[in-house]
Image (cartoon, rainbow, N blue to C red):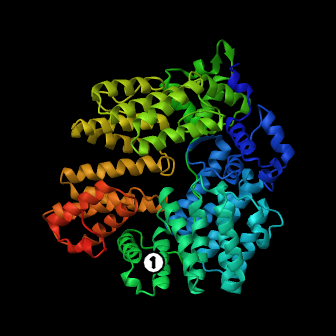
Amino acid sequence: MNKTTDKPEMILALIDNLREEEKIPITQMTYGLCDSSQYAKVLRAKNRRFDKLIIDAFYQRLGKNLRNFECLLDADEYMLFEKREEFRDAFFKNDMEKAKAAAERCATLGICRRSRVHQQMALLFRVYLMMKEDKDSGEILRKAKEALELTIPEFKLAELDKYLYSEVELILLDIILKEEEKLKGVEKVYAFYEKVYRVFREDRYLDNEQIFRFAPMIYRLVRIKLDRLEFEAAGAVCDRMISGLIQDNKILYLTEFLECKGRAKAGMAKMETNKIPEIVEARAIKDALKKYYPEWSPETDIQIYWEFMILPTGEIVKQRRKNLGLSQEDLALDENEEICSVDTISRLENGSHKTSLAVEKQILSRLRMAPERFHREFITDDYSDVRKLKRIAEAQVVGDNTEAEKRLEVLEEAHNRTLYPSNEQCIMQRRACLNMERAQEFDVVIDELQKVMEMSLKNIPGENDEIGCYLFNTEFFVVEAITMIYRRMGDSDRFFRLCNNLLNDIKNIGRFDNTFYFRVITLGRMLAGEYGNRRMFDRSNEIAAENLVKCFKFNRLDMIDSFLYCLAWNENMDERKKNKDKRIELRAAFALADLEKKAKLKERIVKQCDLFYDKELLQDLHYELM
């Protein structure tokens, strides 16, 4: 048997490695989720594991997020996940009848009853529905407390800074504080909001993108401080939140904190608010975004808990087997030793069968895959490897390719990459992208990337640009890099076909938006621009507007200014509609580009103003034109 099948879950080993680094006792991390003795048993066992939501909660309580991990679910867990997705999708679209039906189904499935975390999620859905129906605050408060106490027994607001929190627990805490404020008034909850800010300021929650879970509670704290004329304190909190939201790539509540910072500055200087740059900036952004997502406001915001990178084990087994050129009979036999029957493989691939964990591990090991949840780029049970990946990305973001190369070599030397093809793919893909940034011979880089793909896929993009395979993240990054090279080479036709094929491939295999949401948005930005270049303005606008809503849905800041700029550019280039109606998008795009320090985008906007408008457009924002 492959040695990897004799180990406990890799993600659990990773979590325990991190827990020891953070010096957090097992009892504190597992409190309310499971018994510490049960955790220790599963950590030692090779044939036992926790449900996905419990793993999520462990990792989030340690202050990390799961957006960089892919998770394979068996038939039962995946069915429950699909029901949760049905609820979220219907709720987001305001289809309350469908949402109620999905929530009821989640609560009654047998798997939901086997852990408090599943029950908590089902109760959270009920709380969402009660809030949407404007139920009495007392009822909502009781139900939210009931849900939170499932995993934090005997929870006390006065001691809220003593607990560790998962994302779901933070959402419930936000709801509880909001309803307490409605029932008892601002002064009764002010001290609790101060405790929330104290929890946020702990280093534990500054490296996991959970700032957006704290944002609504801290926003209410800032508003109270402003009402109490504590301008300096309010401004300091706003500064911290604005920089944190931009760093974590979050759009929701960013404009609210900008406005509050402006109010704090106006209060300290005794100035009119309409002369404060932050307020002008915030209003420019809000005016544009309301056109595309008018439903959102801080007063009515209901935070949805999205789950990312969820994959059905059966579908993955089927696709990986085909990619490796194996028959079901080949997979059932491992080095002449029968793993399971061919019928078991068939039913597993059809999603109608749940195998034992031991058999599942053997099957996935035969396919050279991690048999559990794993980091999307580098499969490891050592958290220092995850940090090395992050440091490589940080160097690439600031354009320090020499430093990125050094850090890549450190990762390369520190880990055995031969166990899983995706690890070797990750190293080679990163190196190829560095070569692309150095503008080396593009055809050589494409050859390198093709070799990376051949490590796990047989049908890679070729002369006909056919993709048609189940792409994991590393593979997706590679195909995306190939697509970008064609763009830089000036081969717009090949770029256009590949970009369309990538998006269609995701849709055709039925993956949920939130599985590859960030890649879909990135491709959407490129594709909207290319349609605009081809003067297909209606299609370009459709893609840009659709992805603006996705940016809100998944709370992403970085692409919004590009989509707004695209919409404004299309309107001005389209002879049928040439007018100045898109001033609002251009103002917002410039304000966002300024916040994110995107100098090149600001330059393009200035040029567009020179072409279509006048400099007064940007002078209104109190900026000096470059």
Q: Residue drawn 39% across and 33% down? A: 434
Q: What is the quadrant of the C terminus in the image?
A: bottom left
Q: Is residue 578 above or below residue 337?
A: below
Q: Residue at x 70, y 28 (%)?
A: 359
Quarter where residue 196 is shown: bottom right
Residue 59, image x, y percentages? 68, 48
The tally of labels here is: 1
Which residue sits furthest left?
575
Residue 527 % position (x, y): 30, 49
Q: In terms of depth relative to the viewer, which is nearer, 311 or 432?
A: 432
Name the quadrant containing residue 461.
Answer: top left
The quadrant of the picture occupied by the N terminus is top right
Give the residue at mark 1.
262
**In the image, is residue 110 above or below residue 231?**
above
Nearest to the observer: residue 384 or residue 37: 384
Element at label 1: helix
Q: Is residue 470 visible?
A: no
Considering only vertical position in the picture, is 72 above or below 250?
A: above
Q: Is residue 89 left or right of residue 101?
A: left
Depth check, front residue: 301 or 314: 301
At which x and y percent is residue 457? 45, 26
In this view, which residue lies farthest toward the top?
336
The percent position of residue 263, horizontal first and vertical second, equals 47, 81
Question: Identity of the amino acid at label 1?
Answer: Gly
Q: Residues within 10 Å of mark 1 (few under 14, many from 20)?
A: many
Camera sees residue 149: yes
Q: Residue at x 53, y 36 (%)?
A: 377
Q: Quadrant of residue 103?
A: bottom right
